[in-house]
């Protein structure tokens, strides 16, 4: 049986969480709803052999149902998460400021060994950029986050890489 791992996405409204998940999972698979958490998930199987690892794993990728408007999500959203992706929008300094609070929540409410990654989304909107790559890297270093991936859900850049990097860390951890 293929092992399944929960991956949660957090970050302010409008940074592109749902778009990232849709982009990564739309060609494939079922989705489920967890009514008590007010969130839903999509799944995709990833073959690590194609990426220098071994075996396959199923990623169960969780999206909020808009509760992040209230600047936090219910604690049970984080329950049993193997990994968490904190998304910010490179056209919004405010979304990076908010990422700091999301990381605090993650560290408080997710299991102790949850892999944490940052996604710098909307990297296609180069002319509107408020958060440079360097600012992102400084933020990553300051908060000791192991993964920072530039993404564009719109142009499908960095999305596969993001989930591959997360899956490889999960694999290393299991
Ligand atoms: P969420 O609230 O974090 O789930 O964000 P959504 O996925 O709903 O996206 C918010 C808005 O940003 C939508 O209008 C998306 O089309 C847009 N968006 C999401 N990702 C990107 C991206 O990579 N580039 C651009 N240009 N727009 C994006
Ligand atoms: Mg959404």
Image (cartoon, rainbow, N blue to C red):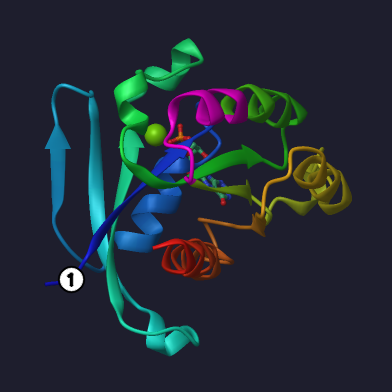
Residue lying at 68% horizontally and 47% vertically, measured from the top left: 145
Q: Residue at x 73, y 44 (%)?
A: 144
Instruction: State the SS at label 1.
Output: loop
Q: Position of residue 85 (x, y in %)?
A: 51, 45
Specify the segment rendered in magenta.
103-114
Q: Is mark 1 within 8 Å of ligand 2?
A: no
Ligand 2 quadrant in view: top left
Q: Foreground residue, 2 or 44?
A: 2
Give how far across and how far down residue 64 sits, in percent.
34, 31
Query: To which residue does mark 1 refer?
Result: 2
Spot occupied by residue 59 in the image (x, y as percentages of width and height) = 30, 59
Q: Residue at x 57, y 27 (%)?
A: 102
Position of residue 160 relative to residue 135, above or below, is below
Numbered disc total: 1
Looking at the rendered image, the quarter that the N terminus falls into is bottom left
Image coordinates of residue 116 in percent, x first then y, are 55, 46
Q: Which of these two is toward me, 13 or 32? A: 32
Horizontally, residue 149 falls left or right of residue 33, namely right
Above or below residue 10? Residue 71 is: above
Q: Quadrant of the C terminus?
A: bottom left
Horizontal arrangement in the rendering, residue 169 relative to residue 123 (left or right): left
* Residue at far top of view: 70
Q: Is residue 171 above or below residue 36?
A: below
Q: Does residue 135 appear left or right of residue 157 in this picture?
A: right
Q: Is residue 121 visible?
A: no
Quick check: is 115 in the magenta stretch? no
Residue 72, above or below 128 = above
Which residue is located at x 26 percent, y 68 percent?
27
Instruction: For label 1, count other residues whose C-alpha is less than 10 Å away and answer few (under 14), some (14-19) or many (20+).
Output: few
Residue 48 visible at all: yes
């Amino acid at each position: 049986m293929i092992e399944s791992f929960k991956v949660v996405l957090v970050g302010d409204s409008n940074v592109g969480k749902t778009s990232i998940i849709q982009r990564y999972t739309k060609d494939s698979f079922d989705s489920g709803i967890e009514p008590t958490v007010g969130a839903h998930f999509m799944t995709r199987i990833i073959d690590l052999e194609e990426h220098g690892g071994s075996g396959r794993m199923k990623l169960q990728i969780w999206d909020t149902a808009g509760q992040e408007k209230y600047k936090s999500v219910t604690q049970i959203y984080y329950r049993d998460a193997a990994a968490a992706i904190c998304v910010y929008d490179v056209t919004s300094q405010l979304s990076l400021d908010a990422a700091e609070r999301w990381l605090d929540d993650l560290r408080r409410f997710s299991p102790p060994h949850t892999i944490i990654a940052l996604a710098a989304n909307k990297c296609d909107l180069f002319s509107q950029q408020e958060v440079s790559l360097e600012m992102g890297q400084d933020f990553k270093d300051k908060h000791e986050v192991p993964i920072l991936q530039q993404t564009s859900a719109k142009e499908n850049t960095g999305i596969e890489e993001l989930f591959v990097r997360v899956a490889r860390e999960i694999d290393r951890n299991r």
